[in-house]
Amino acid sequence: MKLKGPIIIIVLLVAAVVVYQSAYIVNETEQVVVTQFGRIVGSPVVSPGLKFKVPFIQAANYFPKNLLDWDGDPGQIPTLDKTFIYVDAFARWKIVEPVKFFQTVNNPFNAIGRLNDIIDPAVRNFITSNRLIEVVRNSNRELDTTEVGREDEKEQRRPSLMISIGRQNITEGILKQSQPKLAQFGIELVDVKIKRINYVEEVRQSVYNRMIAERKQIAEKFRSEGKGEAQKIRGDKERELKLITSEAYRKAQEIKGVADAESTKLYADAFGVDPAFYSFVRTLEIYRESLDETNSLVLSTDSEFLKYFKSLPE
């Protein structure tokens, strides 16, 4: 009777261990392959909930059911037009046949290696088979930007920017080429995209130098056009200035001529009224302008200039 209590406790502990080993939980993002001594037993468990297996001799192997990511290593790839670029691609994939996945690659880490071996060559193959513009652009839509100083070359350069395939079709081609090779591993490749494209350092420096040279050429063009416009403005200014000066001189001469004519008429009228008085007044003005304490005149006594001095009363 004394051993009955410990025996019950032991039985309960054993029962708890058996239940713990036989039960497992599958959530919404997981799927399970049950194996017995390494061999697959039954169908994969894909529905969530509490499940049971034979304890101790069967094992539950969990695999993700949601989307997984693959991020390739950036690599240097030449395009069809011999331009070397760095291409960084990424993909999304999922396990659609867990049994086949377990039998071939066994775990997601090994699957990444398989993805590297299949997607990287496909990316390289499509990049080397197309021009750089095909990898960069998706359509032939008109660009909504205008390059300053190159407006006159827009029509001439347009044919080189036309694409026939485009980036979207290239990524779809990579997906179609890679998917059949991954199906044997129970993997579905959902999408492949190019994350980043950049020139290699040597080509990048060459592009920068060419851009600098083009900018300098455009700047020199602007300077030359500016100097020509400045010379034109100065010429117009000088021409207008001479025109204004000439017109002002003409008007001044006209006014002066009219004034001189009026003055001459007044003098003539005054002279006609009393010529002797007019001659006398004019002679006095000449005396005032010519004779002062700083000037000396030596004239003969019969000089006409001193006629009014001689005719003064004694």
Image: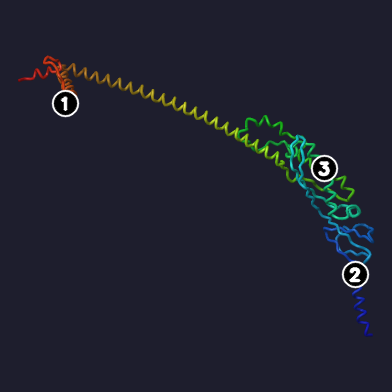
Mark carried by residue 148: none
Q: Residues within 10 Å of mark 3 (few under 14, many from 20)?
A: some
- Distance from Cα at disc 1 to Cα at disc 3: 116 Å
Q: Quadrant of the N terminus?
A: bottom right
Does residue 143 lie above or below 35 as drawn?
above
Say left or right for 264 vs 10: left
Q: Secondary structure at mark 1?
A: loop
Query: Mark 2 highlights which residue?
Result: 19
Query: Mark 1 highlights which residue?
Result: 292
Residue 206 position within the rendered picture, expressed as x and y whole percent measured from the top left: 68, 37
- Distance from Cα at disc 1 to Cα at disc 2: 147 Å
Choose mark 3 or mark 2, whichever is in front.
3
Choose mark 1 or mark 2, whichever is in front.
1
Does residue 195 lie above or below 142 as drawn?
below
Say which label, 1 or 2, has the lower sequence index: 2
Say left or right for 290 vs 115: left
Query: Mark 3 highlights which residue?
Result: 122
Does residue 199 lie above or below 293 as drawn?
below
Residue occupying the far top of the picture = 302
Residue occupying the far front of the picture = 202
Q: Amino acid at mark 2?
A: Val
Quadrant in the picture for residue 178: top right
Query: At 77% across and 35% down in the image, what residue appears?
Result: 80
Does residue 307 lie above or below 69 as drawn?
above
